[in-house]
Structures are given as C-alpha cells and as structure tokens.
C-alpha cells in the first residue's frame, strides 16, 4: 500500500493510504515505526502500526491518571482491568522502567500525606497500604517516619479539641474518644496513655446534673425522685460516687 499523505492533527497524525483508508496514529508510533520516511507499507506493517497505536493510546490514558496523583501498581492494574485495556503487563513494565510507578515511593508519599494532612493513625494508614497490595517492607519503612512523638502530638491534639465541646462525664468522654481514636488507627496503649491523664471540667457536668434534677423534681419527690434521678444520671455516664455526692448535697 502506498502512503499518500501524513497530516498532523493536534497531538496525533493522520495517514492517508491509496486505498482511501485513513488512520489516526499516536506520535510515539510515528517515531517508533519511522513511517515518515516510508512511501509504502505492507499489510503486516499496517497491522503492527494499529496494534502499537492501541498500546500507546492506553498508555497515554494511564499517564494522565498518574500525572494527577501518584499511584500504586495495584491501582494501575485495577484501572487497566476496569477499562479492558490490552497488553496490561507491557504497560506496567514500561511504566516501571521509567520509574513512573514505584510502590516504595508510593508508600512514602501516601504515608507523608496522611501524617501531615489527616488525623489518621498508623494502623489505619498501614491497612490502606495493605489494601493497595504494597510490600510489607515498604510499609514498615514508610511508617518508620511516623514517630512516637508525632503519634502523641496527634492524639493529644484530638483529645484537646474534643474536650472543648465536651458535655459528657469523664467515663462517657473516655469511652467515645477511645472509640474515635481507635477508628482512626491508634493503638489501645497509646490511647489510654493519654486518656488516663485528662481532666474534665466538672462545673459543666454539675450543671447537667442540676438540669436533670430540676426536671424530675417537678414530677417526683422523696424516694421515687432519688431513684429516677439515679437512673437518669447513670444513663448519662455519671459514676456512683458522683451521683451519691450530688444527691447528698442537693436532694432533701
């Protein structure tokens, strides 16, 4: 077949053949096949050009994905499978050769972003890296930058922020905050090392007890009032000592 014309169209090239067939090809293919300097091509060469063109079309789509955000090998593989792209191994290998996907660098970048931009703890970060099929050696290396000092600072910052708006008893506050920190990926030991030392503003809690008492005393009195008050305060998370002290000085 004779090549009649090669015309550039944006980032692609259109080849017109003497059988009136027009083929739009990627710039990489144009360079790799040296087609600019050919006047004729065989059917075999044409099929190779078409096959290579499909490869580079898919390859460029993956490049756009990587340019937006660093990706793990697993993410790229999922993208290739989801979009039913041909030659996935060839694309992966080419990207690895150019160091455009590197799971070790991905683990470091991912962990640094999580440490600096989120509240996430080490266990949650580790789970997300495992979900990306990152090798455990790379995970441990990346997490080594998440030092104990940083962990302590994050936990303390979270606790202090929650204390500012707290309306719960010490018991309830610790219970809720422990669950919250655990879901963020912090260890039980680290959580309780911090929660054991917190101080709750008791004035707010006493106001809450008074509010409950005033509401109940309009309906009940005597033994019934004390019983109802104990039930309500227990439900709110007050300790037996706190309840008995309050009833002793308030209920007559």
Image: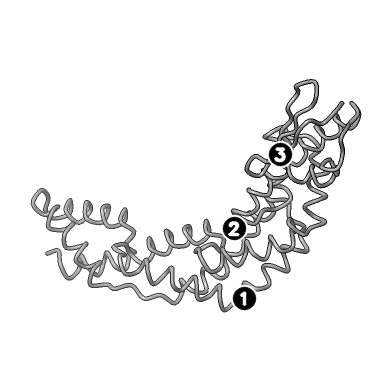
In front of the other: label 3 or label 2?
3
What is the crowding at mark 2: few (fewer than 14 residues within 10 Å), some, or many (at least 20)?
Answer: some
Residue drawn where x is 61% and y is 64% of the image: 122
Helix, strand or loop at label 3? It is strand
Helix, strand or loop at label 1? It is loop
Residue 8 vs residue 186: left or right?
A: right
Helix, strand or loop at label 2? It is helix
Residue drawn where x is 67% and y is 56% of the image: 129
Q: Nearer the viewer, residue 209 or 13?
A: 13
In front of the other: label 1 or label 3?
3
Marks 3/2: CA distance?
A: 48 Å
Return the disc, 2 or 1, that comes first in the chain's sequence: 2
Label 1 with label 3: CB-CB less than 8 Å: no
- The residue wearing badge 3 is 13
Q: Which mark is residue 239?
A: none
Residue lying furthest bottom in this view?
A: 149
Residue 119 vs residue 47: left or right?
A: left
What is the crowding at mark 3: few (fewer than 14 residues within 10 Å), some, or many (at least 20)?
Answer: some
Residue lying furthest left in this view?
A: 218
Q: Nearer the viewer, residue 158 or 109?
A: 109
Q: Is residue 136 above or below residue 7?
A: below
- The residue wearing badge 1 is 147
């Amino acid at each position: 077949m004779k090549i009649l014309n090669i015309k550039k169209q944006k980032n692609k090239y259109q080849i017109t053949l003497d059988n009136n067939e027009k083929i739009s090809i990627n710039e990489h293919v144009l360079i790799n096949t040296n087609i600019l300097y050919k006047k004729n091509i065989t059917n075999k060469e044409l099929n190779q050009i078409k096959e290579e063109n499909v490869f580079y079309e898919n390859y460029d789509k993956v490049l756009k994905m990587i340019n937006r955000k660093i990706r793990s090998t697993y993410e790229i593989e999922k993208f290739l499978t989801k979009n039913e792209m041909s030659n996935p191994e060839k694309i992966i290998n080419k990207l690895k050769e150019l160091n455009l996907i590197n799971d070790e660098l991905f683990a470091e970048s991912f962990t640094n972003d999580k440490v600096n931009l989120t509240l996430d703890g080490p266990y949650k970060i580790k789970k997300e890296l495992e979900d990306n099929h990152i090798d455990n050696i790379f995970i441990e290396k990346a997490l080594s930058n998440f030092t104990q000092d940083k962990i302590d600072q994050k936990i303390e910052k979270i606790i202090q922020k929650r204390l500012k708006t707290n309306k719960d008893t010490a018991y309830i506050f610790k219970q809720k905050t422990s669950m919250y920190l655990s879901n963020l990926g912090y260890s039980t030991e680290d959580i309780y090392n911090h929660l054991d030392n917190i101080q709750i503003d008791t004035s707010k809690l006493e106001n809450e007890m008074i509010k409950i008492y005033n509401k109940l005393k309009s309906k009940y009195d005597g033994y019934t009032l004390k019983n109802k008050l104990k039930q309500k305060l227990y439900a709110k998370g007050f300790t037996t000592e706190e309840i008995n002290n309050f009833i002793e000085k308030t209920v007559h």
